[in-house]
Amino acid sequence: MYSIKFGTDGWRAIIAQDYTTENVARVAAATADWILAKNKNPKITLGYDCRFGGALFAEVVIKVMYQKGVKVLFNKDFCTTPILSFATQYYKADIGVMITASHNPPSYNGYKLKSTFGGPSSPAEIAEIETLIPESFELPNIEIEALVQKEILEYHDFSELYEKAIYQRFDIEKMRQSGLNIAYDAMFGGGQSIVPKLFPNALLVQCEWNPRFNNIAPEPIPSNLEFFAKQIKSHGKIDFAFANDGDADRIALMDKEGNYIDAHMIILMLIYILHKYHQMHGKVVVAFSVSPKIAKMCEKYGLPIEITPIGFKYIAERIMEGNVLVGGEESGGISVAGHIPERDGIWDALIILEYLSKYNKTLDQLIEEVNQEVGAFAYGRNDLRLTEHQKVAILDYCKTQQINSLGGLTVEKLETIDGFKYHLEGERVLMIRASGTEPLLRVYCQAETKEKVQDILENVSSFLKSIN
């Protein structure tokens, strides 16, 4: 029997190998049993993104819920994870189920759980559901359309619901008329269900259904956005460009030259805009892998900050405690006050675009304003694909050895909340951590320039590969 385990954000596995209709049915059965123990007349929201087999696996969930006696509110077309989370909160569903593997390679699909408040289910809830996963579950032989007649299944348009919320919060027409030329890369993901409707005149890149994602993982990192960068450069007049991952809960920005703007800068931008221009206050909650520059900005503005283990579910728990201004991760998943307690790459982009259009600013000017607050910096990441033996050996080395220098720089402090973060001389940072969703060892670096970041990453990555 295949053992199903949830990682930092849901269960993910390779389609047809471990991600099968049989295993999806097992997880769905556990989900149903968990909510039935808490509510005698439960309902769930259900959505899927653009990955291969999304509709098929969603139908498996529907059949399981029918067998268990759980009502399903289903978005019949693909959508984003934030849209599903928004609908979960709006309809007060007992739980939301999203069929997605987010940013993972095309061969993967996955299963995310969302709490009734519209954010990730807590680690405790997920652990409870894991214990309920049966060894097998036999699907009923029934047509999906018959379940509509039985009133166990309802079709809804979650995207339309979300779009209405956008128009209530943002002046989209003013953004359209601002003169700013917008470019958007959906990376063949769920964001194509909403952004082209908001900005039909934008330069739309990879906004069509392609479950193979052109054989590139839909993760908005520099190496995966080279095609988008070329499109921006060839256009020649793009003022604001953004990309989302496969289920659109992550964001990356690009400048007019197609240069990548990472999540650390985006988090700083959002704190800067919400606090300085919207006069909003609250705690900033960020994952362990983010830049110390965020703590520096919080100290300057008198905002409390909390560091969590990596995984947005930990940030969501803090958001539910109240008064959180921004919650964010290095990976580009960022939540803001005034919205659902969920990462939302499209909503984040609209806040920044609103600021640029309202104050007649360029993206370069905004970056310069942020740099004046905290000092200029660059950040980079290497993903090392190693054998399990190599990965374990490196992590054991970091855990047991006294490391006094890395990349030719003195180690001044070590933090181990989730991984190994080495504070180096000159406000530089080097972090080592195993991925919670892929077989990778991630190496992160912050330094004063991109060149210095790359130099440190290459030096340290070479050193790590020599450990065995």
Image: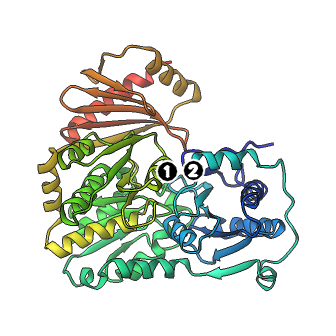
Total count of labels: 2
On residue 423, the disc is none
- The reply to whether discs 1 and 2 touch (Cβ–Cβ < 8 Å) is yes
First in sequence, mark 1 or 2: give its number: 2
Is disc 1 placed on a helix, strand or loop? helix
Identity, as a three-letter code, of the amino acid under mark 2: Ser
Identity, as a three-letter code, of the amino acid under mark 1: Glu
Tell whether 256 sits left or right of 27.
left
Residue 364 image point, x, y percent: 15, 60
Q: Tell me if mark 1 has few (under 14), some (14-19) or many (20+) residues whose alpha carbon lies within 10 angstroms of its own.
A: some
Tell whether 71 sits left or right of 185.
right
Label 1 to label 2, Cα distance in Å? 7 Å
Q: Nearer the viewer, residue 444 or 413?
A: 413
The quarter of the picture where the N terminus appears is top right
Tell whether 136 sits left or right of 34.
right
| Placement of 387 over or under 158, stated as above or below | above
Q: Nearer the viewer, residue 325 or 9?
A: 325
Q: Tell me if mark 2 has few (under 14), some (14-19) or many (20+) residues whose alpha carbon lies within 10 angstroms of its own.
A: some
Q: Residue at x 29, y 56 (%)?
A: 266
Residue 35 image point, x, y percent: 71, 60
| Placement of 212 over or under 388, stated as above or below | below
On residue 317, the disc is 1
Tell whether 196 sits left or right of 256.
right
Q: Which residue is drawn at 66% across and 75% down?
A: 73
Q: Nearer the viewer, residue 265 or 231?
A: 265
Residue 223 visible within the image: yes
Residue 340 image point, x, y percent: 45, 65
Residue 235 visible within the image: no
Is disc 2 placed on a helix, strand or loop? loop
Residue named by callout 2 = 122
